[in-house]
Each structure stands twice: as structure tokens, then as C-alpha cells.
């Protein structure tokens, strides 16, 4: 009987111990489950955060791509503008080159005109000096009695001078100059007057004896 009671007590103790171990095991499992659930939640949070970061990074990357595309388009427009400006600059340079060529040609032509005018003035100045010299000779002849040979020579000189004056080629390209034209007309008039005076002297020299002698 005592042995049976001892066995029962021992069995009760073992059952109590096993119950305690079961409770401890359950508590341990509960604690492990809680820790696992916490870890799962943390991992889930990290996954969600990672997904959010990925989404945010993707959106930021898309925005950067759009910005780069806009910059590329703007650069393309700027390149087109630069190309247009280069074409316009080339056109202006060509126009300036053509204008420079025209100015060079005009300057060359003007130099030719100035040289022609200078030559004409030199020729007329010489003719005027010659006419003055002949006028002096005519004045001297008027004081002589019978200067037929000198008058004939003088008349020939006047004819040569007048012919040279009348036959002087006109330069079409020469510029018009009012003072030059007046000078030329005056020289021609002087030569014509001189020729008339020589002719009058010659007529008086060849007139009949009844005519008043030259110089009286």
C-alpha cells in the first residue's frame, strides 16, 4: 500500500514536472513566435521600405531621364540656331567680299579718271602757255612794218595749236569738272582769238598799198 502510494506520488510529481516543462515549452514557443513575428514584421517593413525606395528611385530616375531628354532637345535647338547663324555669317562674309571687290574696281576706275583729268589739265595748261606766247608774238608783230614771214610762221603755229586742241580725244570715263570745263573753254577761246588776230594781220599785210600800213 505504501509502495502504491509512493508510486502515485512519484507519478504525480512526474506529471507536475512534465506539466511545468510543457508550460515552459509553450511559453518558450510563444516567446519564439513573438520574436519571429516581430522579425517578420521588421523584415516586411524593410521590404516595404525597399519597395518604396525602389519606387521613389524609379520615379527620380524617370524624372532625370525626362530632364536629360529636355536638355538634349534644347541643345538640338541651340545647335540648329548656331548652324543658322553660321550660314547667315557666311552669307554676310560673301556680301562683304563682293562689296570689297566692287570698291576695289571703283577705286581703280576712279584712279584712271583722276589720271586722265590730270593729263588733260596738263595739256590745256601747256596750250594756254603756248597761246600766251603766241599772243606776245602777235603784239610784237603789230609793231613791225612788213613781218610777212613771221606772220606766216605764227599763223601756222596757231593752226597747229588749235588743231591739237580740237582733236584732243575726250575721255568718256573722265569725271565732269566745272572748273576744268571753264578752263578748257577759255583756252579754246584764247586760241581762236589769237588765230583771228593773226588772220587780220595777214590780211592787212596782203592788202593793196593804199591801205594804211600795219602799226599806224
Image (cartoon, helix red, strand yellow):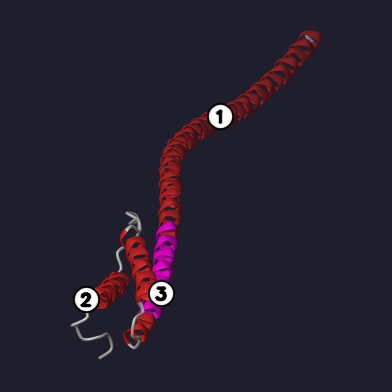
Q: How crowded is mark 1: few (under 14 residues within 10 Å), some or many (20 or more)?
A: few
Check whether the beta carbons of the residues at disc 1 and disc 3 lie within 8 A of each other: no
Magenta span contains residue 50: no
Magenta span contains residue 124: yes
Q: Check disc 3 and report the residue beneath it.
A: 130
* Residue at (54, 31) in percent of width and height: 45
Callout 2 secondary element: loop
Q: Check disc 2 and report the residue beneath it.
A: 207
In x, y percent, where is residue 53?
53, 34
| Vertical comparison of 151 with 62: above or below | below
Q: Which of marks 2 and 1 is nearer the N terminus?
A: 1
Check whether the beta carbons of the residues at disc 2 and disc 1 lie within 8 A of each other: no
Task: List the single residue furthest toward the left.
Answer: 210
Task: Measure how far apart labels 2 and 1 are at the Cα level.
Answer: 154 Å
Q: Check disc 1 and report the residue beneath it.
A: 41
Left or right of residue 192, residue 136 in this image: right
Q: How crowded is mark 2: few (under 14 residues within 10 Å), some or many (20 or more)?
A: few
* Residue at (56, 31) in percent of width and height: 50
Callout 1 secondary element: helix
Find the magenta span and give its range: 112-134
Q: Quadrant of the image for the C terminus?
A: bottom left
Question: For residue 41, what is the image quadrant?
Answer: top right
- For the residue pair 99 and 186, the one nearer the viewer reads as 186
Callout 3 secondary element: helix
Q: Earlier in the sequence, mark 3 or mark 2?
A: 3
In x, y percent, where is residue 47?
56, 28
| Vertical comparison of 202 with 65: above or below | below
Task: List the single residue furthest toward the front.
Answer: 209
Amino acid at each position: 500500500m505504501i509502495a502504491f502510494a509512493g508510486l502515485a506520488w512519484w507519478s504525480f510529481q512526474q506529471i507536475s514536472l512534465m506539466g511545468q516543462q510543457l508550460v515552459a515549452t509553450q511559453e518558450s514557443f510563444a516567446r519564439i513566435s513573438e520574436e519571429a513575428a516581430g522579425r517578420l514584421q521588421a523584415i516586411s517593413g524593410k521590404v516595404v521600405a525597399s519597395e518604396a525606395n525602389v519606387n521613389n528611385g524609379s520615379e527620380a530616375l524617370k524624372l532625370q531621364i525626362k530632364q536629360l531628354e529636355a536638355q538634349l532637345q534644347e541643345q538640338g535647338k541651340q545647335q540648329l540656331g548656331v548652324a543658322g547663324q553660321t550660314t547667315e555669317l557666311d552669307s554676310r562674309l560673301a556680301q562683304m567680299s563682293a562689296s570689297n571687290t566692287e570698291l576695289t574696281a571703283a577705286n581703280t576706275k576712279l584712279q584712271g579718271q583722276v589720271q586722265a583729268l590730270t593729263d588733260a589739265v596738263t595739256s590745256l595748261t601747256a596750250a594756254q602757255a603756248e597761246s600766251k606766247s603766241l599772243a606776245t608774238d602777235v603784239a610784237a608783230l603789230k609793231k613791225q612794218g612788213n613781218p610777212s614771214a613771221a606772220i606766216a610762221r605764227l599763223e601756222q603755229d596757231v593752226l597747229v595749236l588749235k588743231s591739237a586742241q580740237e582733236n584732243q580725244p575726250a575721255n568718256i570715263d573722265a569725271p565732269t569738272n566745272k572748273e576744268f570745263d571753264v578752263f578748257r573753254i577759255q583756252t579754246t577761246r584764247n586760241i581762236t582769238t589769237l588765230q583771228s588776230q593773226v588772220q587780220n594781220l595777214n590780211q592787212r599785210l596782203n592788202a593793196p598799198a593804199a591801205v594804211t600800213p600795219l602799226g599806224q
